[in-house]
Amino acid sequence: MKSENKTASSKEEKRKDAHIEIALHEEIDLMKDPFPQTVLKFQTFPEIDFKDIDTKCRLFKHDFHLPLMILGMTGGVDRGYDINTRLAQVATQFNIPMGLGSLKLLIKERHNPSSHAKKSFDMKKSFPSLYLVGNIGLASFNEGIHLDDIKWLIDTLELNAFCFHINAMQECIQPEGQKNFKGLIKSLEKACHEIKIPLILKEVGFGIDPDSFKLIKNIGLSAIDLASKGGTNWSLIEGMRGSLRLGTIFKDWGNSLEESLNNCQSDSSLSLIASGGIRNGLHCAQALSLGATAVGIGLPLMKAAVQDIENQTQTLEQEILFFEESLKISLFCTGSDSLKAFKAKHGK
Ligand SMILES: Cc1cc2nc3c(=O)[nH]c(=O)nc-3n(C[C@H](O)[C@H](O)[C@H](O)COP(=O)(O)O)c2cc1C
């Protein structure tokens, strides 16, 4: 490997590690109520037995135990292996999908077989039944990354689905941001034609507007992760690495989750994953009532995983059980014994 590549990789590693450090220790979760306008109708006589409630969810033509995805966050850095391993353990235990953080670093380390980057992403080795979702910035296609690299990632890590993130605001605030976003819809279309596993497009905290949705709704994606404003805020995180003055200006901009869900209604088979500030099962039920198939949670699950690693606790498991319990209560008190029954009564 050329030495300039090594330097580029270690800079990228430092950036990824700074994201974790800031996310864990600074106030970058906006903690907004994602659904201020969405009130579910409470039912006095549910006429069901709580223990019969079925939370099974079909997503990516696959059955999961809960309508919940652990969103892509990390890998490629020193502590990435421990965090991803803990997330993968619990995702396997509960049969829910798990995302990896950006794999750009691994492509850069492609010709270095002993790289620790690979180990931190290679979760299928220890958890063969895990539903694992890869991740890379869509704008990487304008930085010399090719579809063959994505196919290599899919084969190497045995990925079940792949997610491209689009992050205009993050790249603008990020000191070393890549701001050439020309031609990315064409690149995404090409990926949809050539890649055979489910593909997801995802924002990173600013949501999806109606015009952008029109451009991508029929190109062959399996799902859109709405990643709206209200939770982890990337204008602030990158601002804390560069210009906080700049990051603060934009922290409240973007589409809220309610707006994104309303912006992305369609009759197609495209699934919507609602994320950005989802913190419990009631939020999940509210998202499902607005047309989502499932929800995603990021930062609180990373915090729980880190707590487990540092203190030998079971916090992550408890977080998922809390989500499950609060989802079941939401279903019970709306008179629904399954997600299907809930959507039939309360969904769009
Ligand atoms: C430390 C950290 C690293 C992240 N890295 C990525 C990434 O590499 N790719 C990506 O698409 N999203 C990344 N995200 C964003 C999350 O996937 C998610 O969209 C965001 O955290 C919003 O969800 P939340 O409010 O539940 O945290 C990252 C989030 C955190 C907290």
Image (spheres, helix red, strand yellow):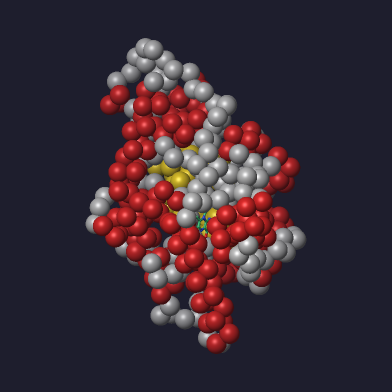
Residue 248 vs 271, above or below: the answer is below
| Above/below status of 155 relative to 280 | below
Q: Say whether residue 300 is left or right of residue 103.
A: left
Visible residue check, residue 115: yes
Query: Residue at (53%, 39%) from the top-left corner?
Result: 32
Specify the farthest residue to the top: 45
For the point 39% across and 12% down, the residue is 44
Q: Is residue 183 above or below residue 315?
A: below
Q: Residue at x 54, y 81 (%)?
A: 7
Which residue is nearer to you in this view: 309 or 345? 309
Q: Position of residue 138 (x, y in %)?
A: 63, 60
Between 267 and 172, the one nearer to me in the picture: 172
What x and y, as percent, mark residue 67?
A: 43, 39
Which residue occupies 53% across, 82% down? 6
Residue sitting nearer the eye, 301 or 341:
301
Look at the image and tell me whether residue 187 can be seen: no
* Total numbered circles: 0
Q: Position of residue 54 (x, y in %)?
A: 35, 30
**Residue 52's x, y, as percent?**
30, 26
Judging depth in this view, the residue of 4 and 36 nearest the camera is: 36
**Which quadrant is the C terminus positioned in?**
top right
